[in-house]
Amino acid sequence: MKSIEKAVEALKQSKYIVAFTGAGISVESGIAPFRGENGIWNKYEEKLFEINYFTQHTKEAWNMLCDGFYEAMFKAKPNAAHIVLAKLEKEGYLKAIITQNIDDLHEKAGSKIVYKLHGNASQLHCNNDGRNYPVTDFDLTAAPRCKVCNTVLKPDFVFFGEMLPKYDMNMSIKAVSKCDLVVIIGSTGVVYPAASLPYYAKRNNAVIIEINPKPSAFTNELTDIFIPMKAGEAMQKLIDILYIL
């Protein structure tokens, strides 16, 4: 409980707060993380998310994507952590969310300023003519195709081997460069270049709060206040105490 109280005090004293979120924030929404217990990599090979594999084995890749991956995305709803972040933004505490996630749960919770480092799964992209489509336009019983040129569509998230979205990365760097506090939620700290962003903030003397059930790559070398709890539980406690004080 002391770490929660320290975090609340740090939040109260900060003027520019940024959240940095990873897969762990969405676990309570029913979306499996990529790594760790019950992670996606325990079910699928990482090559299935490599752009070269997708390009060369599109049918097999889409079979995997349709087999539970998108099903979980469609069912997922924002949990307490997403909702609290949206509320903190509305109240003026939180200036931006930088997320590694592709599930759009921050937007569904009501957050407005969200920089998506790895794209999103809700849109499909045609690499031939550049058109985008909502994934809900397709039933995903087979690989979806462009309605104009019939090219098999690609999920509009970043596969291994692809560049991160330039705009989102640049805006994220600007945000962490001027913030005085970062709340890391559910990130393992091992996926680069995204994981480098909290270090930008630390170099500018920002306070780093980390919420993770278990220590991450950030914990011992970057984190100032570590809260070993699930994302939803921790964020609800933080906001409850914040509004009392």
Image (tube, grey):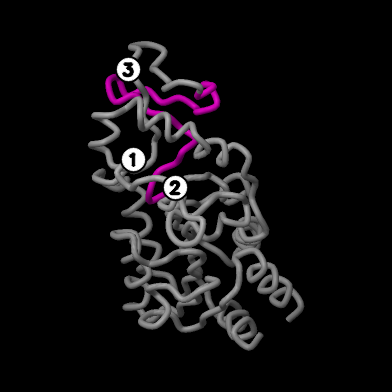
- In the rendering, which numbered label is found on residue 43? 2
Give the Cα separation between the discs numbered 3 and 2: 28 Å
Residues at circles 3 and 2 in contact by the CB criterion of under 8 Å: no
User: Which mark's residue is nearer the viewer, 3 or 2?
Assistant: 2
Name which residue type carries label 1. Leu
Please tell me in which quadrant of the rendered image residue 205 appears.
bottom left
User: Which mark's residue is nearer the viewer, 3 or 1?
Assistant: 1
Residue stretch rendered in magenta on the structure:
116-140
Name which residue type carries label 2. Lys
Towards the viewer: 190 or 46: 46
Towards the viewer: 98 or 72: 72
| For residue 83, above or below residue 135 | below
Q: Residues within 10 Å of mark 1 (few under 14, many from 20)?
A: many
Query: Residue at the location (50% across, 27% down)?
Result: 134
Q: Which residue is mark 3?
A: 151
Q: Quadrant of the C terminus?
A: bottom right
Q: Residues within 10 Å of mark 2 (few under 14, many from 20)?
A: few
| SS at mark 1 in the image | helix
Query: Residue at the location (61% across, 50% down)?
Result: 30
Q: Quadrant of the N terminus?
A: bottom right
| For residue 25, above or below residue 179 | above
| SS at mark 2 in the image | loop
Towards the viewer: 73 or 32: 32
Tell me residue 171's x, y (percent): 36, 55
- In the rendering, which numbered label is found on residue 199? none
Task: Identify the mark nearer the N-term, 3 or 2.
Answer: 2
- In the rendering, which numbered label is found on residue 48? 1
